[in-house]
Amino acid sequence: MSKILIITNHSYMLWQFRRELIEKLSESNEVVLSMPFVGHENDFREMGLRCIETEIDRRGMNPITDFKLFRTYKKMMEKEQPDLVITFSIKPNIYAGITAGELGIPFCANVQGLGTAFQKPGLAQFVTAFYKISFRNVRTVFFENEENAAEFRKRHIIPKEKQKVLKGAGINLESYAYQPYPNNETVHFLYLGRIMKEKGMDELFEAAERLHRNGEAFFLDLVGFYEDTYKERVKKLEAEGIAKFYGFQENPRPWHTAADCVVLPSYHEGMSNVLLEAAATGRPLITSDIPGCREAVDDGESGFLVTVKDSNSLYHAMKQFLALRREQREKMGILGRYKMEREFPKDAVVWETIQALGMSEKPEGNQMRNTGEDETQSLHREEYKAEHSLTGKQKKYLHVKRAADIMLAGTASVALAPFMGALALAIKLDSPGPVLFKQKRVGKDKETFEIWKFRTMRTDTPKDVPTHLLENPDTYITRTGRFMRKYSLDELPQFWQVLTSDLSIVGPRPALWNQDDLIAERDKYGANCVKPGITGWVQVNGRDELEIDTKARFDGEYVKHMGPMMDIKCFLATIGAVLCHDGVVEGGTGEMHKEGEKTGDGSEVFVSEEKISKEIKMGAVATGAAAAAGIAALALIAKYRKRKK
C-alpha cells in the first residue's frame, strides 16, 4: 500500500469536485489530505482519511507568509514520507512542488486554470519562473483544457510528454441528474458564482440593463458572494426589477432546476464546473468563447458562445435566447445533457487520472463511457439507416450522382466566380458583418453540419430561428439580401459544399438543427437518409409556400423516385422556378395551404404538372443558352490566343 499526500488550498472545493477521485485512490492506498479547513473536512474523516489543517493565504503575495508555507510543506513531507504527492492550485503546485523535488518524492500537479497570474505581464514572468523551478522534477501535470497546456509548452515550463489534458473534474451524472425543463412564465437567467469583475459581471449587468430598457421580459437570478465594489450595482438592479440576489447557496441543484438558462461571461476558467453542472441538469448555456467555457457548449445547439469582455455580444445572445420557443430552449438543454454524458462523465475522468498516475489497470469490459455516441444512440441510428435504406439500383446511381455533382459544382464555381465576388462586395457595402452566413443544419442520417450562404440579413437577426418564425422577417433582410433571396443567389456558396461532399446538387433541403417538426415529418417518409441538396422536389413544388408536412411528403417522394430522371427534372425545373420567382415567401411557410388539385390517391398537388413542365422547358432553354454562351466564349478565347501567337 502506497501513501499519497494530497495538498490543496480549499477543503470545500476538494470535496465538491475531487471526492470521487480521492475515494478511488483510498481503496488501495493510504491517503492524507493537507488543506485549510473551510468545509467538509469531517466528511473526509468519515471516509477514513487523515486530514492536516494547513493555512494558506490564497490570494496574498506576502513573501514572508509564503516562505512559512514552504517550510510547513517541507516539515510535513519529511514527517509523512509519502510515496506520491498530488497538488491542486497555484501555491501548492509551486511550494509543495519545489519541496517534493528537493526531497526526491514523486510529484504530480493539477493546473485548474491560469487566472490573473498569466494575464498581467510582470506577474506572468514571475509565476512562469517559479513554475519552471517547481515542475523541474514533476512526473505529470494535469490540465483542464488544451489551451492552458499549450501555454505551458509555449513558455517552456514543461514538455508535452509530461502533460495530461482531462475534461476538467468531470461531472457526476447521478448527483446532477437531468431535471424537466421549467414552465416559467418569464425566462429566468441564472448566474451562479462569485460576483466579481473577472467573471464578466460588468458585461452581464450592462446586457441585462439594455434588455430591460428594450422591453424584453426576463429575470436575472444572482447566486453567490459579491465583492464590495458590486454591492450598490446589485441593489440597483434589484430595485429596477431586473435581478434578485440570493447570496451564497451551498446546494446549486435547485437553482439550476428552476433556471431557463445559465449565463457565465467569464474572462478565464480552467474548466467551469458551474457550466458542467447546469448542462448535466439539462439547462442551456450562454458563456464566453474562451478555454474552460467553450468546451462545455456546442454553439447554437446546447447554448451560445459570446465574445469575451463584449457586452454587445452577450446582449445579442441573451436576446436570441429570449426569441426561442420553450420547446427549442428545452431541446438545447437536452442536447447539453447528452454532451455531458458523452464527454464529461466523472467515472471516465477519474479513471484517466488514475491511469496517468500509474496506479491502476484499465477496467475490463465497457465499464467506462466512451466519448462518442453511446450504444443506445448508435443502435437507434443503425436501425434508422436500415429502415430507410435505398434500393440496390439507387445505391449504384449514387456514384453517378456524385460524379455529376463534382462536374456541375466545379463548373459553376469557376464560371460564377466573378459574379460571386461582386455579390460579396455588395454585401460588405450594404451592411456591416461577414459576407458568409454559417448555420447548423441536419444532413444525411440526421448528422449535423454547417451550411454556407451569402448573408442576406442583419447581424442582429436571431440565430437558428427559421424565417417563418420571425415576427417580422422583412425588417431583418438587407437591400442586397432581398435581391439575392428573390433569385436564390444566397445559395451560391453551397456549390463549394457540393465539392466538399456536405451537399448534393439535388436532394431534400437541409433542415435547421432545431426544426424538430420538419425532421420528425421527414422521418415518416424516410427523407433523412439521403444527402441534402441545394435544390429539391420541394423547391419545384412550392418551396416556402408549403406546410411542413407537405414539404416532408415531397421530400419522401424524391427519395422514393431518386434517379437520373428525377434529378434532371428537379435541376431544370428549379432554374425555371428561379427565373419565374416562384415559391419565395418571406416568413410564409404554409402560404400555399389552400385548395389544391387532387391526385388519384387523394393527396393534394400544389403546383400543377403543366406548370412544372413549363418550368422544366424554361430551365432546359436557359441551360442550353448558358452552355452555348460558354462554348462561344471559349471559342472566342481560343481564336484570340491563336491570333496572338
Image: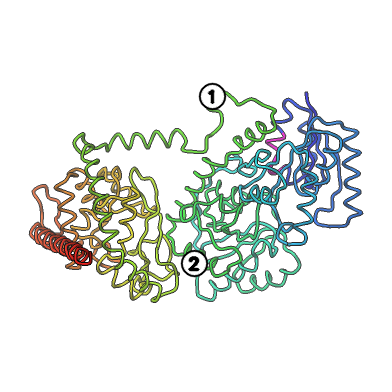
Q: Earlier in the sequence, mark 1 or mark 2?
A: 2
Q: Residue furthest front?
A: 645
Q: Nearer the viewer, mark 1 or mark 2?
A: 1
Residue named by callout 1? 365
Per the rendering, the mark at residue 319 is: 2
**Closer to us: 508 or 214:** 508
Q: Residue 286 in the image: state x and y as whole percent.
A: 54, 58
Q: Does the magenta run of residues contain 19?
A: yes
Q: Does the magenta run of residues contain 16?
A: yes
In the picture, the quarter occupied by the C terminus is: bottom left
Left/right placement of residue 234 relative to residue 382 reads: right
SS state under label 2: helix
Span highlighted in magenta in the image: 15-22
* Three-letter residue code for mark 1: Gly
Q: Residue 230 in the image: state x and y as whole percent.
A: 71, 69
In the picture, the quarter occupied by the N terminus is: top right
* Three-letter residue code for mark 2: Lys
Binning the other alpha carbons within 10 Å of mark 2 as few (below 14), some (14 to 19) or many (20 upward) gives many
